[in-house]
Image (cartoon, helix red, strand yellow):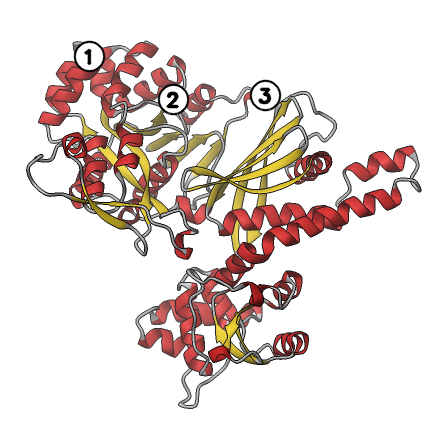
C-alpha cells in the first residue's frame, strides 16, 4: 500500500473526502489482501467508490495531477505519435505537448508508477514524459475514439493476409476448419466491437451484411450510429466467431438462432443477447447489451419525481394484486420491475420469477428461465410456481389469455404479481387485457396499479442552446401562449460526441386503480373514459411528464413528440 509523506494512504483520503465509509473500506482492504491486488482495484470491483474519486485520491497521494478525459480532443500530431496497440498495452494515452514544448509530452496514465510505460513512450516519442492520472475507463474510451477503428481495420486486414497466404497450402478439410478458427485477428476484431460498444454506452450492436460490405452500427441513447465498415468477405468469420461464443450451431445458416454471451469489459460483467437472422446477403446479427448493475437500481435512480415515488411506493406496498409496467421494447420496463422486486426482496417473502430471458441474477430471488422447446412456457411455469408457496410472482411478459388468466387467479388468491405488457398507455393496458378475454370483474378486482414509461434523450449540459418556444410548441405543451418560455436545443461538443445528447431518463405515467376506475373497468369503459377518470384521480400522462422535462431544459420538444405522439 502506498503512503503519502504524512503517512496517509488512498483509503484515508477517500474517508476524509466522504467518498467511502469505514465499514466498506475495511471490507475492501480485506478483499485486496485476500486476492493480492491493489486497494483501488478492490474498491472498483466491489463498487464501493467511483473510479474518478479513486483516481483523484491516488493523484493526491502520488502528487500527480488528475485529469478528466471525457471532453478531451486530441490534435492530429498527438494521435500520430504512438500506435494504439502500444498505448493499450500500457493503458496510457498522450494528451498534448506540455506548454507547447515539443519535447515534453503530457501522458494520461491509469498507473503513474508504471516505469515500463514511461520508458517505452519516452523512447518511442523521444519526449520527456509529464504524467497525469486518469481513470482506466476514460483512457480506454479515448483510445477507442481515436485508435479503435484503425485497430479494428488492422485486425481485419491481418486476417485477410493470413487467409490469402495460407489458402494455397491447405487441404479442403483444413480450409473448412479455417472458416471458424479462433484466429487472433478475428478474436481481436470481435473483442474490439464489444469493447467500443460498451464504452460508447451502446444498448445494441447491429452487424449487417450488405452487397459489398459489412456495416457495424451501435444504438446509443436510442439512436443507431454507423461506426465501422468491413469487406463482405469478413462476414462469415465474424458470424462463426459469434456463434461459437454464444454456443450456437455454426453449420446452421438458414434458420434464425438466439444465444447469449457473457463478457467482461473494464472489470464489469455484461450479458449479451445474440439474435441471428438469415438475410439476402448473409446473416444479420443484433446483440443487446445488458449490465447487471444497470438493471439493479434504487428507487431514487429511476428518475421519478417525489410525488411519483410516493405513488410507486403505495402501489408496490399492496399485499396482493397485479402491478403492470407497460411500454415498447427498450423503454426500461425490466429496470423498473427489477427495482420493484429489489424493494420487496426480504428473507420473510418467497419471490419467484419466470422470465424470457433472465436478464439479471439477483440474490434472494428464485428465477426461472422459459424454455419453449422443453415445454416450459410462461403459463406452464406459472402453474408450477403456484405450488411453490410464493408471496410475490414476477412474470417477464403477459403475452396471451392463458398467462393473463393464471396471473389474475394468482393475484385474487393472495399473491402479488408484477409483469410487463406492450401497450401505449396505462389506460390502454386495461383495454388490451379485456381484448385478451379476461373477465372485466376479475380485472377490476386484481389490477392495483399500471406504470407506463418511455425513455427520452437528455440534452448535453455542456452545449445545449436556449431559445424561445414558438406558439405551437407552447400549445403542444399546454403552456400559456402569451407568456415567455425558454426551451433548449441540442448543440454539439466533445463531451457528447457532437450529438447534443448524453444519456437518457425515464418518463412515467402511473395509474393507481381507484374505486372509480374499478367501476369503469367492470362496466368495460373505453380507453378514453378510463384515461379521463385517471386524470381526475391525479394521474400525469406521459405527455405531461415529458413536457415538464422540456420546460426544465432536460430534453427537447422533438423527444417529447416521440414519447407522446400517440397518447
291 to 23, vertically: above or below: above
Residue 398: which disc? 2
Q: Which of marks 2 and 3 is nearer the N terminus?
A: 3
Task: Out of 83 and 295, give the one closest to the viewer.
Answer: 83
- Residue 390 in view (yes/no): no
Q: Which of marks 2 and 1 is nearer the N terminus?
A: 2
- Residue 237 in view (yes/no): yes
Horizontal and vertical percent for residue 394?
37, 31
Horizontal and vertical percent for residue 36?
58, 71
Instruction: Please tell me in which quadrant of the rendered image residue 52 appears.
Output: bottom left
Horizontal and vertical percent for residue 499?
40, 46
Question: How many C-alpha atoms fall within 10 Å of the one at disc 1: few (<14), some, or many (≥20)?
Answer: some
The span from disc 1 to disc 3 (Cα, nearest Å) is 38 Å
Question: In the picture, which quadrant includes the C terminus?
Answer: top left
Nearest to viewer (mark 2 / mark 1): 1
Secondary structure of residue under mark 1: loop
Question: In the image, what residue occupies the spot 7% across and 35% down?
Answer: 480
The span from disc 2 to disc 1 (Cα, nearest Å) is 21 Å
Nearest to viewer (mark 1 / mark 3): 1
Task: Provide the residue designation for mark 1.
Answer: 526
Is residue 416 found left or right of 91 in the rendered image?
A: left
Residue 373: which disc? 3
Secondary structure of residue under mark 2: loop
Instruction: Please tell me in which quadrant of the rendered image residue 243 appears.
Output: top right
Question: In the image, what residue occupies the spot 25% across and 46% down?
Answer: 554
Question: How many C-alpha atoms fall within 10 Å of the one at disc 2: few (<14), some, or many (≥20)?
Answer: many
Amino acid at each position: 500500500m502506498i503512503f503519502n509523506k504524512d503517512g496517509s494512504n488512498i483509503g484515508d483520503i477517500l474517508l476524509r473526502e466522504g467518498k467511502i465509509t469505514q465499514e466498506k473500506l475495511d471490507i475492501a482492504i480485506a478483499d485486496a489482501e485476500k486476492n493480492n491486488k491493489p486497494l483501488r482495484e478492490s474498491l472498483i470491483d466491489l463498487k464501493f467508490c467511483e473510479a474518478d474519486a479513486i483516481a483523484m485520491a491516488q493523484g493526491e497521494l502520488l502528487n500527480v495531477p488528475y485529469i478528466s478525459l471525457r471532453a478531451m480532443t486530441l490534435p492530429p500530431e498527438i494521435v500520430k505519435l504512438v500506435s494504439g496497440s502500444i498505448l493499450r498495452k500500457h493503458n496510457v494515452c498522450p494528451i498534448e505537448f506540455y506548454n507547447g514544448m515539443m519535447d515534453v509530452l503530457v501522458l494520461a496514465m491509469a498507473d503513474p508508477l508504471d516505469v515500463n510505460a514511461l520508458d517505452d513512450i519516452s523512447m518511442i516519442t523521444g519526449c520527456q514524459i509529464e504524467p497525469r492520472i486518469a481513470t482506466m475507463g476514460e483512457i480506454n474510451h479515448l483510445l477507442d475514439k481515436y485508435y479503435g477503428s484503425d485497430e479494428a481495420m488492422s485486425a481485419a486486414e491481418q486476417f485477410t493476409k493470413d487467409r490469402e497466404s495460407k489458402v494455397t497450402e491447405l487441404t479442403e478439410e483444413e480450409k473448412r476448419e479455417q472458416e471458424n478458427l479462433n484466429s487472433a485477428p478475428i478474436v481481436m476484431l470481435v473483442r474490439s466491437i464489444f469493447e467500443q460498444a460498451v464504452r460508447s454506452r451502446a444498448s445494441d450492436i447491429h452487424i449487417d451484411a450488405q452487397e459489398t460490405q459489412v456495416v457495424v452500427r451501435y444504438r446509443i441513447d436510442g439512436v443507431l450510429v454507423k461506426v465501422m465498415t468491413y469487406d463482405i468477405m469478413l462476414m462469415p468469420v465474424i458470424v462463426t466467431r459469434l456463434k461459437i461464443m454464444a454456443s450456437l450451431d455454426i453449420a446452421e445458416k438458414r434458420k434464425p438462432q438466439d444465444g447469449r454471451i457473457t463478457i467482461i469489459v473494464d472489470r464489469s460483467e455484461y450479458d449479451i443477447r445474440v439474435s441471428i437472422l438469415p438475410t439476402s446477403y448473409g446473416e444479420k446479427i443484433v446483440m443487446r447489451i445488458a449490465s447487471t448493475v444497470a438493471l439493479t437500481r434504487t428507487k431514487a435512480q429511476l428518475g421519478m419525481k417525489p410525488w411519483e415515488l410516493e405513488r410507486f411506493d403505495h402501489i408496490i406496498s399492496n399485499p396482493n394484486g397485479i402491478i403492470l409496467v407497460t411500454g415498447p421494447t427498450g423503454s426500461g420496463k425490466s429496470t423498473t420491475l427489477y427495482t420493484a422486486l429489489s424493494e420487496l426482496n426480504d428473507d420473510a417473502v418467497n419471490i419467484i420469477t419466470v422470465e424470457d430471458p433472465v436478464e439479471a441474477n439477483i440474490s434472494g430471488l428464485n428465477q426461472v428461465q422459459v424454455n419453449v422447446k422443453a415445454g416450459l412456457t410462461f403459463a406452464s411455469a406459472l402453474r408450477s410456481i403456484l405450488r411453490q408457496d410464493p408471496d410475490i410472482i414476477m412474470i417477464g411478459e403477459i403475452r396471451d389469455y392463458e398467462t393473463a388468466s393464471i396471473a389474475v387467479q394468482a393475484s385474487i388468491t393472495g399473491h402479488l404479481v408484477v409483469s410487463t405488457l406492450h401497450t401505449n398507455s396505462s389506460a390502454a393496458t386495461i383495454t388490451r387485457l379485456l381484448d385478451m378475454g379476461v373477465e372485466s370483474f376479475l380485472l377490476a378486482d386484481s389490477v392495483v396499479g399500471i406504470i407506463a414509461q418511455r425513455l427520452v434523450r437528455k440534452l448535453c449540459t455542456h452545449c445545449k442552446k436556449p431559445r424561445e418556444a414558438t406558439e405551437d410548441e407552447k400549445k403542444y405543451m399546454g403552456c400559456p401562449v402569451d407568456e415567455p418560455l425558454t426551451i433548449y436545443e441540442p448543440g454539439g461538443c466533445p463531451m457528447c460526441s457532437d450529438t447534443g445528447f448524453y444519456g437518457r431518463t425515464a418518463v412515467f405515467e402511473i395509474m393507481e386503480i381507484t374505486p372509480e376506475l374499478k367501476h369503469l373497468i367492470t362496466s368495460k369503459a373505453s380507453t378514453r373514459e378510463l384515461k379521463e377518470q385517471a386524470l381526475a384521480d391525479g394521474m400525469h400522462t406521459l405527455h405531461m411528464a415529458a413536457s415538464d422535462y422540456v420546460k426544465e431544459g432536460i430534453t427537447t420538444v422533438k423527444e417529447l413528440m416521440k414519447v407522446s405522439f400517440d397518447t
